[in-house]
Amino acid sequence: MSPDDHAGPAATELQTSPLHGRHLEAGAKFAEFGGWSMPLEYAAGGVLAEHAAVRNAVGLFDVSHLGKATVAGPGAADFVNACLTADLTRIGPGQAQYTLLCADDGGVVDDLIAYLKSDDEVFLIPNAANCAAVVARLAEAALPGVVVTSQHRDFFVIAVQGPHSDAVLTAAGLPAGHDYMSFVTASFQGAPVTVCRTGYTGERGYELVAAADRAVAVWDAVVAAGQPYGLRPAGLGARDTLRTEMGYPLHGQDISPEITPVQARLGWAVGWKKPAFFGDRALRAEKEAGPSRLLRGLKAVGRGIPRPHMTVSSPAGDRIGEVTSGTFSPTLKTGIALALVDAAFSDGDTVTVDIRGRAESFVITRPPFVTPGVRET
C-alpha cells in the first residue's frame, strides 16, 4: 500500500490514533497498518532521517495501533503460561516477556509482549491485526473466574527509542533507568503511565502505555523534553528498517500461521520444559525432527535491494527459499533481508536473490546486522 492510499474511499473505515491530530500537524504521510491509519514518515527528513535519529539520538513513535488486552482473575498468570509459548514463571511482577500464541499445528497466530502485573493479572500487547484473534482464542480457553478483555482503543502506546531516551524521559518527569524488559507505573499530571523498557528498534528505549485521553499530554511533554537531545518523531517506515537491521521478525512476513517459531529460530521464546502450551506437540515434534527451512539473514554483496517474496537460489541456480523481509539498511548502506531458506544452508554461504530478473549475490549473515544498544545498562 502506498503512503497516500489511506486517502481513498476506505479511509473512513480505518481507525486512528488519539494522536492523529498531532501527526497531521507534523506533516505525516499515512499508511494502513492492521486496520489503522498510522504515520509512515514525516515531512521533515523522512525515513532516513528518522532512522538515523533513533540510532544516534532519540526517536518518538506512535504505536497506538498495537493491540491491548487484559487477562485477570484468580490464577490468570498460570492460565496465560499454559497458553503462550514462553515460560512466564521465569519473570516476576513488574517484568515483561516476549512470547507467542501458536495454533495446534505450531503456526504463529501472533507474537506479543506480556506484562506480568501480578499472579492474577497479565496485560498483553499483541499486533493490531491479530488482537481480536488473540482475545478470542484465550477467552475460549479461559478457566472459570479468568476474564479476557480487549482494550484495544482504551490505551495509547508510544515508543521513545535511542541513546538519549533516558535523558528525555527524565526531563519529561517520567521514570527511566530500570532494567531491560521491566516496567514501572508512575503518576504523570495526575494519571498513571506505565513505562516499560522495551522496543522494536534494537536501541535502548521505552514504551509508554496510558489511558487514551492522556495521549496528547504525554506526547507533547516528551516532544518538548526531547528538543535539546535531537528528538525526532518517527513513522512506521523507520520502525521497519530499524527492526530489519536487528533481525526482529514481523508477523505476517517472517512469522505467520504458516511459519513456526522453530523455523523462525525463535526457540528461545519457547518454554520447552513447560508441560504444555498451545501448539506444543507440533513444535516439539518439529524441533526433534529438525525443520526443513530456517529464517536466515542475508546481506548484499553488491547493490541489490531485496524485497519480500523474491526468490532465493543456490549458487547452482536451484530455488532454496524466499525473502520474507527486505530493505535498504540506512546504517550499513546496503541491502539486507530475512529469508526462509533450506535448512542445509548456513551462515557464511553465498546465495542469490532474483531482483527484477537479475541474480544478485548475498551472504547468509546471522542477525543483528548492526550492533544493538537495547540491553546497555
Image: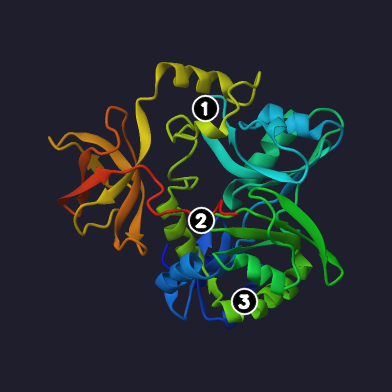
The mark nearer the N terminus, 1 or 2, is 1
Q: Please tell me whether mark 2 sits on a helix, a strand or a loop.
A: loop
Amino acid tagged 1: Gly
Amino acid tagged 3: Gly
Residue at 53% of width from left, 33% of height from top? 268
Disc 3/disc 1 C-alpha distance (Å) = 43 Å
Q: Please tell me whether mark 3 sits on a helix, a strand or a loop.
A: helix
The quadrant of the picture occupied by the N terminus is bottom left
Indicate left or right for 253 with 147 as reference: left
Mark 2, residue position: 373
For label 2, the crowd category at 10 Å Cα-Cα, with few meaning under 14, some 14 to 19 and many 20 or more, is some
- Rendered position, 301 above or below 170: above
Estimate the x, y position of residue 105 in percent, counting from the top left.
Answer: 52, 25
Amino acid tagged 2: Gly
Quadrant of the image occupied by residue 49: bottom left
Q: Nearer the viewer, mark 3 or mark 1?
A: 3
Quadrant of the image occupied by residue 117: top right
Q: Residue furthest left?
A: 316
Mark 3, residue position: 226
Estimate the x, y position of residue 311 in percent, counting from the top left.
Answer: 25, 43
Mark 1, residue position: 106
Indicate left or right for 214 with 168 as reference: right
The quadrant of the picture occupied by the C terminus is bottom right
Estimate the x, y position of residue 88 in percent, counting from the top left.
Answer: 69, 33
Residue 118 vs residue 280, the one in the foreground: 118
